[in-house]
Amino acid sequence: MRTTHRLAAQVSARLEELHRSAAVLRTAMENLQESPKPWQSYLLEPPFAVEAANRLDVTFTAPFALAGALFAQLDHSGQSGEAGDARVTLQIPGLLAVPAGTIRKATQLNRDKEAFAGAVADYRRALGHLPSPERDRLLRDLLVAAGYPRAHLRQCYRQVLVCPRQPHAIALSWVKARKSIRKVSPQWCEKKLIQLDPTGADAGIQYQLQLLGEMQHSQYQDLRQVQVQSRPNLQVAEIFRTKSGDDYRQVGYGAMPVLVLGDDAGSLPDFTRVDHQPGAGQRRQRRDLALGREPFLPALRVFLRQTH
């Protein structure tokens, strides 16, 4: 119990540090917005980014202030009474040229994000003897007690991508929304459903367990879990030109503006211009993975494969 209290205190302390460093970075970004020296920006405006800007109440005409607000948004957005969706994050892709001091502030924020994520993981491990819903409740209670009842863990964890060295060029490309389908067993589904409702109090989960128990043996091979990456991702790579050729380094997927060390004029290196929204591609459906319209087990996003 004493160890749990110590780990809980670390979660609260790390979350305070995280908010402080996020506020420092936001102020630095707002100062760049007001700086007499122009700093180059390139933000993309797909519909999900426009929605994010609206939620942050900052326009694309102030790109550095907008990015600062996004970096500092560590809570669920929306009205205080709304339930936040832990799977949904605010995303605005693009590039911003910044000075070295801002890169250092972003790097410190990333370190604080890692420290907070580690503290949460340690706390959850200390509660490993409890069912998952109970661990989630205790963590949420801890965040409430720390003064951050609407803390959005994904937004607290995700890193600000930085290019601390000036690359010769930056390559941008859209990676379209993806769907992954994997085969699962009835035993796996049963275990996961029980973990979601260990006390048997959720009628919906219990009904899905009943459906699972009533399956015919011939259907056991037809269970498929579907996971959808609903938004496209902006893939960012640095290019350094050497005597032996171009050296590409993957920076990552830019859900938030990537901070790039600007040159003396405050400019970005050469970079690829892309459309604000990737073109719609036609996905060919594989006949052997054709799924029903409605999920068989909605709590797990599990469908039944159609065999006819």
Image (spheres, rainbow, N blue to C red):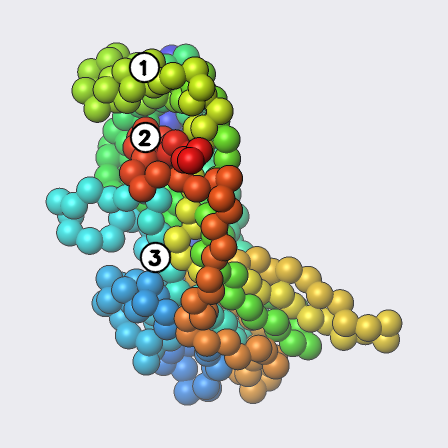
**Cα gap from disc 3 to disc 1, whole angstroms:** 41 Å
Which is in the foreground here, disc 3 or disc 2?
A: 2
Residue 27's spot in the image, x, y percent? 37, 66
Instruction: Give residue 284's mark.
Output: none
Query: What's the amino acid at mark 3?
Result: Leu
Location of mark 3 (residue): 90
- In what element is the residue under mark 1? loop
| Mark 3 / mark 1, whichever is N-terminal | 3
- Work out which residue is located at the far front of the displayed protein and give it: 308
Q: Check disc 2 and report the residue beneath it.
A: 296
One can see residue 6 in this view: no
Q: Bin the neighbour count of mark 3 within 10 Å (Cα to Cα): few under 14, some 14-19, many 20 and up.
A: many
Give the CA separation, mark 1 to mark 2.
12 Å
Q: Which residue is at a point 27% across and 15% down the rendered structure image?
A: 210
Identify which residue is drawn at 32% across, 35% down: 295
The residue shown at (48%, 82%) is 40
Label 3 secondary element: loop
Residue 153 is drawn in which quadrant?
A: top left
Query: Horizontal and vertical percent for residue 62?
Result: 33, 77
Distance CA(mark 3)–CA(mark 2): 30 Å
Quadrant of the image occupied by residue 188: top left
> Element type at marker 2?
loop
Q: Say whether marks 3 and 2 touch (CB < 8 Å).
A: no
Residue 209, how many percent across, how many down?
Answer: 30, 17
> Residue under circle 1?
214
Quadrant holding the C terminus = top left
1 or 2: tag closer to the N-terminus: 1
